[in-house]
Image: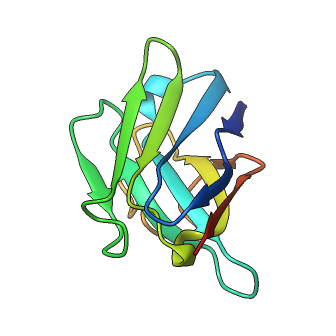
Amino acid sequence: QVQLIESGGGLVQAGGSLRLSCAASGQNFGSRAMTWFRQAPGKEREFVAGISWRGGWTTYADSVKGRYTISRDNAKNTVSLQMNSLKPEDTAAYYCAAGRPYGTGDITAPNSPEYWGQGTQVTVSS
């Protein structure tokens, strides 16, 4: 069992920055790819960023590439998402998610994570 708790969301003006954090408890954090998804009202949940279980590989949605950076600290069981140059269209609830231990599937797929956090709201004003 893995519990994920997100923090760091809030209201920011366009062009600003936020840093989201996700604290994980439970077993096998260091063997799980970690991802961030987001969901805006009336829209489907979409992949934002992912990082391999050792942190050596990252992937991003085209819409955030160059603006967002995902990182992890396996010693502290945390994963972070640094978001810069925020746009109003980035407004959404952001979810931290944990993949299966040593999983090899497509981590960008919404049905790939094994565990989800409760989400943290990010609102970007124009």
Q: Can residue 110 be seen from the camera position used here?
A: no
Give the position of the C terminus as an image quadrant. Answer: bottom right
Percent of width and height locating residue 54 = 30, 30
Q: Does residue 63 show up?
A: yes
Residue drawn at (53%, 21%), measured in percent from left and top? 77
Q: Position of residue 26 (x, y in %)?
A: 67, 22
Please tell me in which quadrant of the rendered image residue 49 appears.
Answer: bottom left
Name, please, the residue furthest toward the top: 75
Q: Residue at x 46, y 63 (%)?
A: 86
Nearer the observer, 71 or 14: 14
Quarter of the figure that contains the N terminus: top right
* Residue 15 coordinates in the image, percent (x, y): 43, 62
Residue 120 vertical position relative to residue 111 in the rendered view, above or below: above
State how the image is colored: rainbow
Q: Is residue 20 above or below residue 63?
A: above
Task: Give whichever of 44, 82 is nearer the camera.
Answer: 82
Tag count: 0
**Left or right of residue 125, residue 59 in this image:** left
Relative to 99, residue 89 above or below: below
Instruction: From the viewer's side, name the closer residue of 22 and 84.
Output: 84
Question: Residue drawn at (47%, 49%), measured in percent from left and top?
Answer: 17
Image coordinates for residue 109, horizontal then vertical, percent: 48, 70
Residue projecting furthest to the bottom: 42
37 relative position to 105: left or right:
right
